[in-house]
Image (cartoon, rainbow, N blue to C red):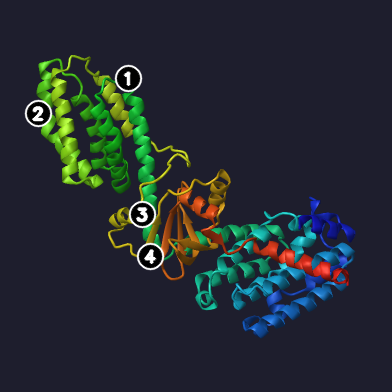
Amino acid sequence: MAGQLRRLLGSTGGAGFDATVSQGPSPALAAAIADRPAVGAYLGGALVDDDSPAGVARVAVALREQSSELKKKAGTQSEKATIEVVALMFQSILTEERIPPAMRVWFARLQMPVLRVALAEPAFFGSLDHPARQLIDRMGSCIMGFNAGDVGGSALEAEIKRIVQVIEQYPETGRQVFEVVYGEFQQFLTRFLTGKEATQKVVSVAQQVEQKETLTIQYTIEMRKLLKDMPVRDEIRSFLFKVWAEVLAVAAVRQGLQHAETVTLRKTAADLIWAASAKPNRSDRTRVIQDLPQLLQRLRAGMTLLGLSVADQDIHIKTVSDTLADAFLAKTQPIAPAQIETLARHLTELECSVHDDGLGDLPLDVDSVELLLGIEASDLEVVANGGSKPTPAMLAWARELQPGAWFTLDHNGRLARVQFVWRSERKQLNLFASNEGRSYLIQAGRLAAYLQAGLLLPQEEEPLTVRATRDALTKLEANPERLLG
């Protein structure tokens, strides 16, 4: 398609869209555009407000007439071709049935601002990253999944109208105004897509789960490094790595890194290591005996915070107690107090620095989400990792999905139209929501696997402006005379 456009603009005497210098329209066309009122005023209020099929058709006719008048003012064949291509693109958008009729009219009001940009910057036709294209594509992908009744009066409708009006108010700013409002629309989507109370709760829990797993990994890595050269029994190492690292992470997420209980639990790790080391002198053994009840109590408090059953706690406590008893008879070298102090200091000063791809699978299911939510999550499906292994290309595709886009999800034999509403900070968790109120929390690996298997299909195979450009080229191939007529 890019090649077709290049040949098309080149054959009409233009510079193609490889030109990097803004050229601007010829004087007569520039004057005609400057004298042209905003499309909303040009079409008339009554016509713009008519969102019936007949009203949309009348808007299309009015825009066609406007384009014909501008082509008469064009000073070059290239300008005529640009006007025609842009006009055909917006005709295609006006006939896009998946966009509610009222919204199609507002999209149509962008024809003149886009034409100004296309005349000044031929690169508009050759780059998907042009801000004008990005804005239209993003608004289109968000609005296509809604019925007219769902959009009417919504915050999304109000935001799209505001953006169009802002662009119309600054006709001389070119791509700059598109860049500004595109950034504003991105920020709006972040608030809008997660605005429902139920969605906010799920997002909050998902963020906590991801943060907890990140901290668990970091605590485990840190303790492994610090215990590498210490004479610590394997039973204590296993308890610290498999249980206590997660206890510290849960405490940090729920109460904060500097909360008194979190600090106490971190100190407990250092106290346990010291207590389980060899005790060659009587004073150290006496101290262990005196501190043991409080140490075991803190271990139980941490495991209770983790949600372990009393039976599981008893097993861990027995293992720890037996190891501490053996330490009384051990003949190995005791751990130096300086090493214990170093361990405690490193755990206290720990900062999370795990890479985005360092988490792997998260232990996430409906039960754990319900526990953190405190309510029944009957309208939430948790799709954990598993199944087929996706290719790197599919993993990359999953990471590039844009919030607001609509998909068809085939999950456990049930089809649902869902909108991508949120991605976690470390890109491990993704939330989709249906119009019926059901949500799907999908881990990154499984999301890529669903894309690979065709179980998650985008409702748009290509962006709105790409499809509109393709339609324009098809019409021009069938009737090339209209290009310069």
> Is 270 left or right of 328, judged from the image as shown?
right
Mark 2 lies on residue: 290
**Callout 2 amino acid:** Gln
Q: How many labels does the image show?
A: 4
Residues tagged 3 and 4 counted as in contact (Cβ below 8 A): no
**Callout 1 amino acid:** Asp
Give me the residue at 40% from left, 38% from top.
352
Counting residues from the N terminus, which is met first, the one under dot 4 or under dot 1? 4
Q: Is mark 3 on a helix, strand or loop?
A: helix
Residues tagged 2 and 3 counted as in contact (Cβ below 8 A): no
Q: How far apart are marks 3 and 4 (CA)?
A: 13 Å
Question: Which is in the foreground here, disc 3 or disc 4?
Answer: 3
Screen quadrant of the C terminus: bottom right
Counting residues from the N terminus, which is met first, the one under dot 1 or under dot 3? 3
Q: How far apart are marks 2 and 3 (CA)?
A: 40 Å
Q: Distance between the residues labelled 4 and 1?
A: 50 Å
Q: What element carries label 2?
A: helix
Residues tagged 4 and 2 counted as in contact (Cβ below 8 A): no
Residues tagged 1 and 2 counted as in contact (Cβ below 8 A): no
> Is 183 left or right of 27, judged from the image as shown?
left
Give the number of the disc on residue 413.
none
Give the number of the disc on residue 229.
1
Mark 4 lies on residue: 197
> Is 360 left or right of 89, judged from the image as shown?
left
Mark 3 lies on residue: 205
**Callout 4 amino acid:** Glu
Q: How far apart are marks 1 and 2 (CA)?
A: 28 Å
In the image, 48 versus 355, the foreground residue is 355
Residue 52 placed where, x, y %? 62, 84
Q: Distance between the residues labelled 1 and 3?
A: 38 Å
Counting residues from the N terminus, which is met first, the one under dot 3 or under dot 4? 4
